[in-house]
Image (cartoon, rainbow, N blue to C red):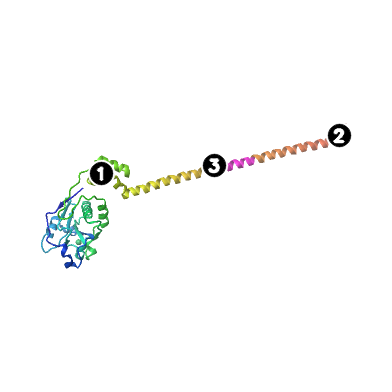
Amino acid sequence: MSYQYLTQWDSPNFTPANQTAQSWGVNRQIKEIAIHWWNAPNSGATFEGVVGGFLKPGGLSAHYVATGSGRRVACLVDPTHNSWATGPGNPYTISIECDPAQSDADFDVIAELIADIRSAYGDLPLVAHNKYVNTRCTPYDLGRLDREARNKFSHATDWGKGGTVTAPTPKVTAAQIAAAYLEVLERTYDQGGMDTYLGSGFDIERIKNELRNSNEYADLKVRKAQASQAALDAAKKAAEEQARLDAERAERDRASSVADAAAQAAKDEALVLARENNNLLKQIWAAIKRIFNLGA
Ligand SMILES: [Zn+2]
């Protein structure tokens, strides 16, 4: 993806870098990106109207005015100089006036602009206007802008007034990107990712590396590790259950052999008793025969 980068309008409202100390007592030092919205959402203010306002002498300015509507970014003041947008934050900030509609397309264009600014000026944090001035500007979700910006690929080398946005020549096909999604993230691609990588100018190995560096890939690895742990746990539980069943069977076998042995002992005992009885009867019979002299 990309956006129209409009540099034909120059705001007269700015402080040149070499006059920063005279105005604010410090030199120009770009440390942050100040996010603004250009008015309340129901104000009816348009991109053209806001740009026009910043071109009027004696008014205010911003380095950039950005909207997802038509994917447009106007650079009105070169970021080397101080725009008049953020009060005492002006010496430290690059300012973006954002479409207050806060549509997904607005987020997408602003995030791409942030990625482009960072490619030129370093990993600048995002701050709201109200860090420096007590104002309702801006309710933009800076965390979301930051996350989206970190998924963008800058096409820029110069993000000042001389900048241009040129989509690089793709080094990959849509089919290769689709295959990379399946291989790395084990799912079909999403359109946003497809558009981003087709426009990135990256080769397929770089794209796979980017996918492997994503939070989604980290989550996937955690889920797979958890799934294999669950399988291990289930196997361990099954083995324990089998061992318990084996132990029960062995115990039953032991108990029944004890009972068999007891029954055999009882039988043996009965036999012994029977033999003894028999002997006793024979002795009695012999005694009777002796007493009555019945002969041998
Ligand atoms: Zn503001």
Above/below status of 292 relative to 124 = above
Question: Residue placed at 24% from the left, 64% from the top?
Answer: 131
Specify the label residue 289 is tagged with: 2
Above/below status of 169 relative to 130 = above
List x then y, in percent, for residue 169: 20, 44
SS class, disc 2: helix
Disc 2 crowd rating (10 Å Cα; few below 14, some 14-19, many 20+) is few
SS class, disc 1: loop
Could you tell me the amino acid type at mark 2?
Lys
Could you tell me the amino acid type at mark 3?
Asp
List x then y, in percent, for residue 266: 69, 40
SS class, disc 3: helix
Tell which of 292 and 191 is nearer to you.
191
Question: Residue placed at 37% from the left, 47% from the top?
Answer: 223
Specify the label residue 203 is tagged with: 1
Q: Earlier in the sequence, mark 3 or mark 1?
A: 1
Q: Name, please, the residue furthest toward the left.
A: 57
Quarter of the image holding residue 282? top right
* Residue at mark 3 to residue at mark 1: CA–CA distance: 59 Å
With 208 as the anchor, is 113 left or right in this view? left
* Main secondary structure found in the magenta portion: helix
Q: Name, please, the residue furthest toward the top.
A: 296
Q: Which of marks 2 and 1 is nearer the N terminus?
A: 1
Q: In which quarter of the image is ligand 1?
A: bottom left
Look at the image and give the residue range highlighted in magenta. 248-259
Q: Name, please, the residue furthest toward the right.
A: 293
Asked if the stretch drawn in magenta spans residue 54, the answer is no
Question: Can you identify the residue that label 3 sits on?
Answer: 246
* Residue at mark 3 to residue at mark 2: CA–CA distance: 64 Å
